[in-house]
Amino acid sequence: MRPITGTHVYSYVKCPRLAALDLHLPRSERRPPTEWEEFAAQRGRDFEASYVAGLGAVAPRHPERDFAAGAAATRDLLLAGTPLVHQGVLQTEDCLGLPDLLRRVPGASALGDHHYEVLDVKTSGRPRGEQILQVVFYSHLLTALQQRAPSHGALVLKDGREERFVLADYEAAHDRVLAALRALRAEPTGARPFLQAGCSGCYHDQRCLGELTAAQDLSLVQGMSHGARAILEALGCRTIADLASFHPQHARERGQLDAALVRRLRRAAQAHLLGAPLVETRPRTERCRDGAIVHLLGDPFADRVLAFGTLYPAVEGGRFTWTRAADADDEWRAFDELVAALPERVPLWHFGEALPRWYEGQVFAREADPALELRFQALDKRLRGAATYPRPVFGLSDFVQFGLQRDALRAGHPGAAALWARGGDGDERLRQKLETDLRDLAELIAAILEAPPTVQADSAEGVATLGL
C-alpha cells in the first residue's frame, strides 16, 4: 500500500485526478519537466536551502528513502529537544510526511517538557490553501508521534515572512481531503480528468488530455463545470456531439439547469465540433485598433518585470516597440518611456491582470499621472465575451490556439522568460516573445472583436448551416 504523503494532499487540492495518478503510477509515467520547469523547481530548492542554512537546523541521518530509519532518527532528535529539525520524517501506518522544519516550542508532550510545530518553506508571496493543508497533514503525523497536537503551523514565504495560522481552523477540510485520498488509493477511477486552467503545467497533461479527447468529454466545452457535466451525463448527454444537438423542452429535461446556460454550453459544443470560434452578437462601440496594446514579460519568483512592449496602433502591422528593465528600480523608467512615446489619451489595451497589478504597486511611490490608469482596458475580458471558443480558454496561449488556430508558444513559453534573461541571447528571446504576443493580440482583435457575428446554431437549420 503506497503511503499518502504531503505531496498527495497538495495535489488533491489542485486536482483530485492528479493525486489519484500519483498514488497509482510510478514516477516514470510522468512527462519529463521542461527546461524552464526544472529551472523554477531548482530555484525553489535553492531558496529553501538558503533559508535553512543560517538557522542551525539539524537533519536526521538515514539511508536515502529508508523512511523507517528516518522516522527513528527524527524521533531521537525530537526526544533530545533539538531546536530545529530540517527534513524530518514523520510516519504512521499509511501516511508519510517530510516537513521542511520542525520547531521546538514550550509545552509538555510525550517527548518531554517540550513539543514541536511544523513550518514549511514556500516560494509563493502569499499563503495558499493547498500549502496550509500540507502543514495540517504534517501536524497530524507529528501529533501521533509526540502525543500532543500543536496549536499552530506556519508557512515561510519567499520574502522570509512567517505566516502562522491556527490548525483547528483547517481540521475539517484536512479530514475531508485525507478521506478522499484514502478512497482514491483504493479506487483511482473515483477521480475523472476535467480540463482546467492548471492542466497545461501538469506532468500528466498529455495522458489526461488524450483520455478526454478520446471520450469527447464535456469538460472540453467552454463554460462547463463539474456540476453541469454530472447533470448532463445523468440526462444521457455524455459526449460533445450529444450536447451540440441537446434541445430540452422543459426544466426537468435539462436537469433544472438554467436554460440560458444550456444554450451557451450547446453553442460551445458546436464550436468545438466546428473547430473554430463562433463570434457573438454584441454592441460594437470602441474600436480597439485605435488604441495601443501594452504587454510585459515577468519573473514571478523575483516579483520582477523583465521587459515591456507596445504595439501601436493595435493592428497586426502596427509599430512594435520594447524596452528591457535592467532591474526592479528600472521598471518604472522602462514603462514610462514606452507609454510617453504613445499619443496622449489612446486606450492602453492589456491582457490579464499582470500590468494593472504591477502599476498599482508602483504608482503610490511615483509621481504618476492618475489619468494613466484610467486608460487601461482589459482586452482578455473583451475577447472572452465576444466569442464562444472550441475549447475552454484560460490564458493568452489558449486564445491564440483556439481563436487563431495557431501555435501560441512558437516564440517560447512565457514561463521561461526568467530563464532566458540569464542567457547570452536573453534580450533577443524576450524581444521575439513580446512582439509575437503583441501581434497575436492584434490579430485576435481583428478576428474576434471586429468580425461579423457567426450565424446562430440553436436550431436544426442553424446547425446544418455550420456543417455540424
Image (cartoon, rainbow, N blue to C red):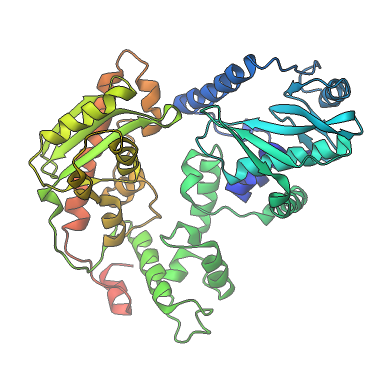
Point 38% across, 52% down: residue: 393
Percent across and percent down for residue 368 are 21, 37
Q: Quadrant of the N terminus?
A: top right
Q: Nearer the viewer, residue 313 or 342?
A: 342
From the viewer's perspective, tell me whether residue 140 is left or right of residue 31.
right
From the viewer's perspective, tell me whether residue 32 is left or right of residue 3.
left
414 relative to 260, above or below: above
Percent across and percent down for residue 225 are 50, 62
402 relative to 225, above or below: above
Q: Please indicate, yes or no, whether residue 361 appears anywhere in the rendered image.
A: yes
From the viewer's perspective, tell me whether residue 223 is left or right of residue 377.
right
Point 18% across, 47% down: residue: 371
Q: Quadrant of residue 307?
A: top left
Point 49% across, 26% down: residue: 40
Q: Nearer the viewer, residue 273 or 252?
A: 252
Percent across and percent down for residue 139 are 76, 39
31 relative to 129, above or below: above
Q: Nearer the viewer, residue 435 or 140?
A: 140
Q: Nearer the viewer, residue 209 or 175?
A: 175
Q: Residue furthest left?
A: 343
Badge count: 0
Percent across and percent down for residue 362 are 31, 35
Q: Quadrant of the C terminus?
A: bottom left
366 relative to 394, above or below: above
Q: Please indicate, yes or no, whether residue 21 appears anywhere in the rendered image.
A: no
Q: Residue furthest bottom?
A: 250
Point 21% across, 26% down: residue: 323
